[in-house]
Image (cartoon, coloured by chain):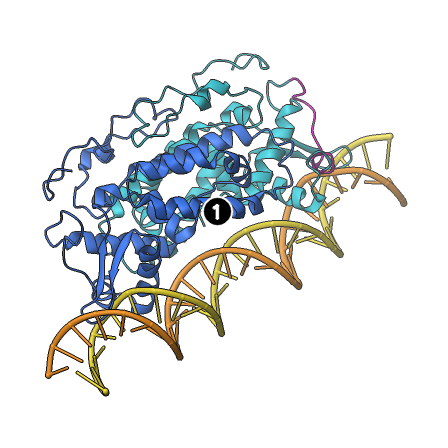
Chain colours: A cyan, B blue, C orange, D yellow
Amino acid sequence: MLRISKKADYAVFLLGAIARQGAFPGGSAEDTVVSAHEIARQAKLNKSVVANLLKGFAKQGVLESVRGLRGGYRLAKHPRDISLADILEVVEGRFVLVDCVAHDSTRASGSIASGSIASGSIASGHLLGLAASMKAVGDKHDDCALISFCPSKAPMRLVHERVSQLFAAIHLDELCSLSPLASSAIASIPIASTPTATSPKPRWARANKPSPLTSPR
Amino acid sequence: MLRISKKADYAVFLLGAIARQGAFPGGSAEDTVVSAHEIARQAKLNKSVVANLLKGFAKQGVLESVRGLRGGYRLAKHPRDISLADILEVVEGRFVLVDCVAHDSTRASGSIASGSIASGSIASGHLLGLAASMKAVGDKHDDCALISFCPSKAPMRLVHERVSQLFAAIHLDELCSLSPLASSAIASIPIASTPTATSPKPRWARANKPSPLTSPR
DNA sequence: TGAATGAGCCCCAAATCAGGTCTAGTTTGC
DNA sequence: GCAAACTAGACCTGATTTGGGGCTCATTCA
């Protein structure tokens, strides 16, 4: 189903909750941590759901964890350096829009993985390792009956790339409204067939403009 | 899971197979039909899978069916007037990237439905009716625990819109290679954070250039 | 040492997916 | 009129995934 999972949705919120409390490098509370219990309270979600999600992010290096009494989590990077693509990768695994994309992307996984991850600028060692292990798993997706003669492969791969880029272009700071969207940015999107080349550069596309909440990078 | 279903994938192929045989208005074999059995043979798929998919498209007006001996299907419109979004809608239902999009889009479903469908230029009565009936179903998606206080709604909606536009911008003629992609169009896509405003207008974004296979629109 | 945390692993029911079956209706050709 | 070849309609089954949890162990601090 062509849908972001509830867990991923929750994850965005949870990470945003941490970000909004400034618990990240350069943030207003960069040396503090936020417990899973506290985050669950804010999200009005069961603690085990929250804890399990947060654990995954700690494991992949998106979050840093502090164990023991007064333990908790903080972001490993600035929210503007964590993209939606990164978040989705942790929760849902490698994004593959359609099987034949995985097939082709397996051969090119080096360049794709480095592209989507480098732009996130997180602890790339962790997720790059994940992408490398997905290489083997990716082969399992090569089971579409049409794969050897499907004329849709090239266009589908293009769509996949574009969607990937969209996800990589939006970052946690906008997602949790640390850097709010200008509402005119939404209104300015024409509902037409060929918007991509004509739409103005969205506010949430990173322009390397420092967030007012942070010290310079 | 953020994935196009196998059935949708097969559907693209099947519709493409019909298109490649010219069985559409203005096509080289516009008065002929292609049987489900024949299409299944070409696709090397079980006939029941194929038949069920094709039925859905006939029901929604994407295909015209001819019953009885020598019956079969032909496209109701030219392949360039049938978008990937249209196809996905039939197979998977209304595209909703994430619950809060459905919530908000329910109120605005009039403008969205007319937008994505008008650009497809198919028998809009059919799919518009589907969109209207989805209005009620859409309310069922309003069950995300975070919905009332989630700061991600606006950015997520923007991503949803963009993905929708991508799907609406690619049409069956390119998908089935009646109008092949220029391979440089793929190579020219930079793997960067902010590609949308800088990428060249893709070949498959309709430029109202008549396909050499068809008479003028 | 006990309390409050994270880490690791697992469970279960519901929903969805993928692939199919069967019957009824329609049309044509003999 | 009947049989064959098709579509139309509705449904089924097993596999997989999703969503929401639970429990125990390890770590840290007061």
Residue closest to the eye, B215 or B211:
B215
Label 1 residue SS: helix
Whether residue A9 is visible here, answered yes or no, is yes
- Judged left or right of residue A118, residue A74 is right
On the image, the x and y values in percent for residue C19 come to 37, 67
Vertical arrangement, residue B146 with respect to residue A27, above or below: below
The type of residue carrying mark 1 is: Met
- Residue A30 belongs to the span the image colors magenta: yes
Whether residue A93 is visible here, answered yes or no, is no
- Judged left or right of residue A100, residue D10 is right
State how many labels appear: 1
- Judged left or right of residue B108, residue A160 is left
Q: Residue drawn 69% across and 29% down?
A: A33
On the image, the x and y values in percent for residue A38 come to 73, 34
Q: Residue drawn 51% across and 23% down?
A: A80
On the image, the x and y values in percent for residue B89 come to 39, 48
Rendered image quadrant of residue C15: bottom right
Residue closest to the eye, A191 or A114:
A191
- The span picked out in magenta is A28-40
Residue wearing tag 1:
B134
Residue closest to the eye, C25 or C2:
C25
Secondary structure mostly seen in the magenta stretch = loop
Residue closest to the eye, D27 or A179:
A179
On the image, the x and y values in percent for residue B5 come to 39, 53
Q: Chain of mark 1?
A: B
Q: Are there few (<14), some (14-19), or many (20+) residues within 10 Å of tag 1?
A: some
- Residue A96 belongs to the span the image colors magenta: no
Which quadrant of the rendered structure holds the C terminus of chain B?
top left
